[in-house]
Image (spheres, grey):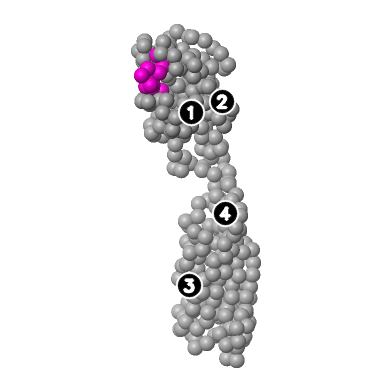
Amino acid sequence: MPVINNIAGLLRSVVDSPPAHYIMKVQSFSLLTKNSIERYESGKFEAGGYTWKLVLYPSGNKSKNVKEHISLYLALDDTSSLYHGWEIHVNFRFFLYDQNNDNYLVVQDTASKERRFHKMKVEWGIDQVVPLKDFNLVSKGYLVEDTCAFGAEVFVCKERSTGKGECVAMMKEAITYKHLYEFDNLSKLESECSDSKPFNAGNFKWKIKLYPNGKGAEMGNYLSLYLALADPSTLSPGSKIYAQIILRILDQKQAKHHFGKANYWFSASSHENGASRFMPINNFTNQNLGYRVKDSCLVEAEIIIFGVVDALS
């Protein structure tokens, strides 16, 4: 494998064998630039147990101030199924087909330098693979009758987890969700708690939990009321929801509603918030007040989601 040169941290060589993992043939190459295609992503290909794409900038990667060169990059295609804190160390090299000599120019980092792919960096490559003035010369064989071919070989050196991490996303425009639910036949409850039907708010399912005779130590003295995630097991480990909640028992006679308000981080292990002393039972059952009418009550939950924390994947 003859070495052509070693310039600017790149090793250039010539080989006869085609790339082992992927070849991308481009016909009418000049039309990419003419049609304002500054970046082209190839189809998916598998190497080392992962899925990749070749990314081509036909006239240079302008975001890195590259001009008059071919820029090529390797991009990890799908990271959604990877384990938390994933990290992949990779050796890769790019190929450019010489149609005159039926061989390939190979360009790679010197000393086979490994590149580390992770959540915050899923693309690595070479800004200046070859100058366009050389690429366009018919004598070089790279572009013949406006047709060329690029390729890649990808070798995974090692994989490891970097541990846990999280992504905090605060909402620029918090949305208020309201849900009204009627709890009826309160005197006929067979358990101390009555749950509302699940309802949606902010891409999560919630439920209202009413203890008309109180909960725990407050049994018989206070009505207890909570808002809970309907199925906390659907939250991944490390995920949290920061929300403001307002729970109201509506006064159906005089509209003097009774409410409680709190800000809370909901998670799989801490999935409900409310008050065990939400309202004295004497007030709730007082017929002169409108909280309990015909053995039923109306409870409204108001939810404002301010932020969501997800584990980095």
In this image, 14 relative to 313: left or right?
Answer: left
Q: Position of residue 120 (x, y in %)?
A: 56, 37
Quarter of the view holding residue 171: bottom right
Cβ–Cβ below 8 Å for labels 2 and 4?
no
Local SS, label 3: loop
- Position of 43 relative to 261 (above/below): above
Nearer the camera: disc 3 or disc 1? 1
Residue 308: numbered disc: 4
* Kind of residue at disc 4: Val
Q: How far is disc 2 from disc 4 in space, using C-alphas?
A: 38 Å
Nearer the camera: disc 4 or disc 1? 1
Quarter of the view holding residue 287: bottom right
* Residue 136 visible, this angle: yes
Q: Residue at x 53, y 28 (%)?
A: 61
Pointer 1 residue: 57
Cβ–Cβ below 8 Å for labels 2 and 1?
yes
Pointer 2 residue: 66
* Kind of residue at disc 1: Tyr
The numbered mark, 3 or 2, whose residue comes first in the sequence reads 2
Pointer 3 residue: 196
The numbered mark, 4 or 1, whose residue comes first in the sequence reads 1
* Residue 108 visible, this angle: no
Q: Is residue 142 magenta?
A: yes
| Residue nearest the viewer, comparing 193 with 4 | 4
* Kind of residue at disc 3: Ser
**Residue range of the region highlighted in magenta in the rendering:** 141-151
Q: Residue at x 36, y 14 (%)?
A: 99
